[in-house]
Amino acid sequence: MARRRLQTFATALLIALAVPATGRAHQPVMDMAPRWQGGFGFQLRNVQRSSNSLRSGDKKVANAQSRKRQVNTTWLEGVYTFKRELRLTAKIPWVEQKRVFNPGGSAIAQTGSGVGDSILGFQLKHYFNRAKSTGNVGLTPSIRLPTGTTSDDYPVGDGSWDIGISASFSTETFFVYQFYDLFYWHNTKGERGINRGDEVGLDVNIGIHPYHDNHRNLGIFLMGDLSVRHEGRGNDDTGGTTGGSRISLGPVVVGYWNNLMFRTDVKFPVYQYARGTQLDRGIEINVGMGVAF
Amino acid sequence: MNKTIFFTAILLSTNLALAEPSPVVLEEHQTIIQVNGVVCSFCAYGAEKALSKIDGLDKSEFGDGVLVDVETHRITLAMQAGAKIPFQQIYQRIKSAGYDPITVHVRSKGKLERSGDTLLLRDSESGQAFLLQDAAKAGITDQTSVVVQAHFDASQIPDLGESEPVKVTVDRLIGDSNPERDGGERG
């Protein structure tokens, strides 16, 4: 048993070190697990996105000064299940980012790195079990703490305390998995003139479970991801006007082996609308792994 | 083309959802629990982890004595020969793992004790007692010892006393004997 546990830890550690990871800040840290009382889990996710495409409204515009942006965020996330109906989640991002920006008319390179703004969530969940399905309904009030520094040229935090709420529903049969999450963030005014608008969004994952091995508890899910976002107009004295809307679609692959879970997804923007003139969101690549005990 | 793929997927998933469950077949010293909600593959680990700590498991089977089948929603426990099946522990551990036990299937071999209308089967290895119901339908009449597969509703477990016999419905007579009738054991 000790050997098996050691192997599990070693595998988790290897994968955690080997993969760049990603994730969406508002989503639950692991959805169906750990649902057992006293269960806990960790997740490492890396989100990479970059863009060199300028947009004004829903139109692409010329990027004469070669503005660009690259953001790499690695989230360390934890969940503790007090009892089936109540979980505490914590998410701490490490951000490495750079951009070419033109605050005074001439293009300059700016960077920022360090711990970003962390999120604490208190998940209230109601699980239901039926003969051939299981699922849960969740309500998650969250708070985003100003743990990120605002001192870099390209700040990794905004210095504000923000509050959010998400309502989620997921259900799973042996063959089909569905997840829906609707969320709202109220962003308050931060430091250095960073005052982002409130954000509302919807995430949908629907997919199939084509392979499962009972003896090894090993399997995969193949899903599609839909992400819809709308952020009200805001301002950032370090970066200009903020806000806009977007819709992304993309594939998701999830694998699991006993208490280990791996996820990768890619988000391709299919619609984008920018307030003012901004770099667009670009393609997002997410890779992550989690372990539950 | 896309519509064809979409409707095929819907049909496939519907067929899978409506498929009749396969009959429960127990090997010697096995117990199977039908559990609502055990379709969640990643968290099947939680159920297995919780049940692997119960008393009397034969850990040489399935790696840890527990096999979770997320397709049939059944959990199979391999018990050691002579071990009593700890129904209370099983029930509590499945509940605390986040699932709902519905039906428990057991297999037992032992002598029959008759008292009026009641028929008690005492397992010859563990001494665990089962009150047999619908025994005649399964072909149990004048036998003195039997091997049976039976089931009972898991909801009776919380109210079950420590040494109280479990009321079970006989599904299948696997073997029987009546020395006075046929001079030996069959099956």
Image: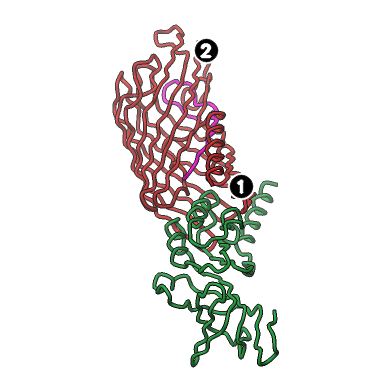
* Residue A284 in magenta stretch: yes
- Chain containing the residue with disc 2: A
Judge by depth and name the residue closer to the eye, B170 or A110: B170
Q: Looking at the rendering, in which quadrant would you find the C terminus of chain B?
A: bottom right
Q: Residues within 10 Å of mark 1 (few under 14, many from 20)?
A: some
State whether residue A270 appears in this view: no
Q: Is residue A158 left or right of residue B156?
A: left
- Kind of residue indicated by mark 2: Ser
Q: What kind of secondary structure does the magenta stretch mostly adopt? A: strand
Q: Residues within 10 Å of mark 2 (few under 14, many from 20)?
A: few
Task: Tell me where residue B78 appears, x and y as whole percent.
Answer: 58, 62
Q: Secondary structure at mark 2?
A: loop
Task: Tell me where residue B33 appears, x and y as whole percent.
Answer: 53, 65
Q: Which residues are magenta?
A: A272-293
- Colour assignment, chain A: red
- Kind of residue indicated by mark 1: Gly
Q: Which residue is mark 1?
A: A219
State whether residue B89 appears in this view: yes
Task: Tell me where residue B86 appears, x and y as whole percent.
Answer: 47, 66
Q: Is residue A266 above or below residue A39?
A: above
Q: Is residue B36 left or right of residue A161?
A: right
Q: Which residue is mark 2?
A: A66
Query: In the rendered image, what is the letter of the chain coloured green?
Result: B
| Marks 1, 2: nearer the viewer | 1
Q: Secondary structure at mark 1?
A: strand
The residue furthest top is A106
